[in-house]
């Protein structure tokens, strides 16, 4: 199981917005350039995030994006699920007919692992990541 590039880029893009003053509208090109994300790919990601209200899209010459809510009110789970849908660590957890085995012990294990992962994603916010980012030495940052 790995984070997709879309999830990673989406989180980094939202983190960048969270670092900006609350009233600032940030151009997509700036987010793309500073985060090292292809602009067209980031545009698709931010389209999903704006539909859910996690980010606000501002049109026009001075258009761009801003956070839809304060950073401490946006969970990592919301970002990930807005980009990719429900987070599933295995196909067998998606639908009952994805696996022929009944009462599979592996499925039970995967359910427990997924619940723990979703709990971590749900408990931590963009504000938490911003705080952690400040603790990481500059040389070890992206």
Image (spheres, rainbow, N blue to C red):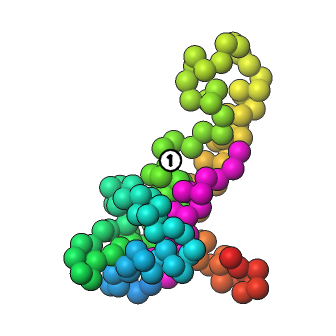
With respect to residue 49, does 99 lie above or below? above
Q: Position of residue 141 (x, y in %)?
A: 70, 79
The span picked out in magenta is 1-19
Q: Position of residue 87 (x, y in %)?
A: 57, 43
Assign the C terminus to one quadrant of the image: bottom right
Which residue corresponds to the image point at 55% horizontal and 24% vertical from the top-left? 95
Q: Nearer the viewer, residue 46 or 18?
A: 46
Q: Nearer the viewer, residue 81 or 27?
A: 27
Q: Is residue 2 magenta?
A: yes
10 Å crowding of disc 1: few (<14), some (14-19), many (20+): some
Q: Is residue 135 left or right of residue 62?
A: right
Helix, strand or loop status at disc 1: helix
Q: Is residue 68 left or right of residue 81?
A: left
Residue lying at the far left in this picture: please name it. 60
Instruction: Residue 132: name its quadrant.
Output: bottom right
Q: Position of residue 6 (x, y in %)?
A: 54, 56
Q: Which residue is mark 1?
A: 84
């Amino acid at each position: 199981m790995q984070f997709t590039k879309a999830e990673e880029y989406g989180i980094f893009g939202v983190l960048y917005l969270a670092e900006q003053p609350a009233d600032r509208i940030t151009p997509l090109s700036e987010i793309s350039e500073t985060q090292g994300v292809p602009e067209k790919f980031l545009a698709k990601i931010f389209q999903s995030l704006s539909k859910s209200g996690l980010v606000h899209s501002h049109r026009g010459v001075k258009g761009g994006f801003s956070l839809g809510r304060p950073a401490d009110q946006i969970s990592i789970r919301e970002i990930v699920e807005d980009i990719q849908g429900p987070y599933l660590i295995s196909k067998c957890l998606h639908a009952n007919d994805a696996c022929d085995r009944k009462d599979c012990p592996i499925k039970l294990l995967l359910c427990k692992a997924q619940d723990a992962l979703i709990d971590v994603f749900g408990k931590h916010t963009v504000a938490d990541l911003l705080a952690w980012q400040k603790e990481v030495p500059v040389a070890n940052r992206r």
